[in-house]
Image (cartoon, rainbow, N blue to C red):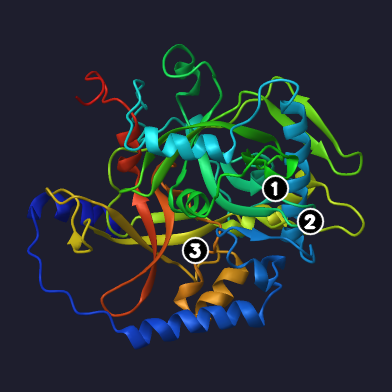
Amino acid sequence: MPQKADIERVKNLATGDARRSVPLPDTASMLVKRLNDAMNYWDENPDVYHMASENKNIEQHHTVDHPSSAFSAMERYLISASRQILNMGKRSSSPADFQHIQSCMDASVNEQLDIELPYESVPKPERRVALTNAKSAPDDINTALDDGVLLLCYIEFSELGKEKISICSGFAVQGGDKLASTDTEASGPIIVSCAHTLESVMQNYVKPKGSSADNESIVLAMTRLGHIYPVHTLLSYLPGQDLSLFQLSPNAYSFDLDSFQVTPLHDTSMRTLPVSPYPAVINTELSVSSFGGWVPDATAGSFSIKEGLTQHDVVRNRWAHAKLTGYRDPIGRQAETGTYDELAQLDFQLDWDSEETPESLREAAMRSTAVFPIPGSSGGPVVDIHSGCVVGVVRGQRSSELGDVRGDAVPAEKIFEFFALPGLGKRK
């Protein structure tokens, strides 16, 4: 019996361009109520994902004055590690700071690279995204400890204990090694993330006067195994698509909080994810990267980042089961696959009654649909469960015409605007 998604695929190819009706206006009161319900839920349940309520806006620049929760402890860990990496950089090549990133935003807006990104709508088994869920067995978890999703951190230093940090997600794609002979001297991995966190940080950044350790800044990415890569540069920035493309340093580091030592890691590699240039159809089953997978269980007296992030219960929180509910064009109208419509927004809805969705998310979703994606998930991948390829990039939440709140992602086909067209080169 054909699946519903297969039937929709046939319908989309057969019907052509759909007629558009006049959308119903948003019901503001309904939307406000749902958002208030969601905020109340996190206030009343601060221990969901072991995250304190003050960390709800982690994508906004904020200080970490009192590391009272597991995640705020990890923020302090990242700040401490970045200080040591900056000290090492003074003796060799310095990582990119906010001034460099800010200048790149002006120089590389809508920039297209000379390299191509492979089309991988049906990736080979070894290239499929290593997904886990709330019901994953221990053996499945052990083979998916590094699933290719990254934590992207913007850190601005001031006096000790008053540093500012913003956090979102990202993932690596193929092509970093090819850039060594073209656009840049570095050969580090290239990663995709959202642009709105980048914009928020840089819009509020004021170029410091004079030089001081208190005026330093850094952007870094951390893998699921706790390997830390400083950002080398911003390669391109697509404000209209809410996408950014960074290149990381080829050198990774580990940081031991007890000894306060940073250790260079040799012979490490970063897992890249397959990206599909074709839109997934309505009702496709999705696995959406969730920030819950970055919140470890803290242990009394010490904090081991690798152990914390690879605990089985934490790994089971990495992905949430969802369903693709539709597409929107650049001005918010309903768009259809298989037509000439431009697909600017991918809408998805958390499958809150699925046993594969983390229990804490299911409980929260029964209270309000506005609890997902969790802040910090922006920039993470949206994956087609059946093909194992990336079909979208998490952006946030949007309201429907009836005031219902759904997840919002950038269709993965927009990622290819960073790269040259296969066989055709760059746009003229």
Query: Which residue is situated farthest in the front direction here?
Result: 210
| Residue 157 - label | 1
| Residue 373 - label | 3
Q: Confirm or deny contact between disc 1 and disc 2 (CB under 8 A).
A: no
Q: Amino acid at mark 2?
A: Gly
Q: Residues within 10 Å of mark 2 (few under 14, many from 20)?
A: few
Instruction: Indicate which label's residue lies in the foreground, 1 or 3.
Output: 1
Quarter of the image with the N terminus in it: bottom left
Give left or right: position of 178 versus 404.
Answer: right
Cα separation, mark 3 vs mark 2, equals 29 Å
Q: Between residue 162 and residue 341, name the one nearer to us.
A: 162
Give left or right: position of 359 versus 13.
Answer: right
| Residue 401 - label | none
Residue 111, placed above or below residue 290: above
Question: Residue 269, can we see it?
Answer: yes
**Dot 2 lies on which element?**
loop
Residue 156, placed above or below residue 117: below
The residue under label 2 is 161
Q: Amino acid at mark 1?
A: Phe
What residue lies at 45% left-to-right and 24% top-to-bottom?
A: 175
Residue 293 pos. (x, y %): 63, 55
Q: Amino acid at mark 3?
A: Pro
Residue 5 pos. (x, y %): 29, 56
**Dot 1 lies on which element?**
loop
What residue lies at 58% left-to-right and 41% top-to-bottom?
A: 147
Name the N-terminal-most of marks 3 and 2: 2
Image mark count? 3
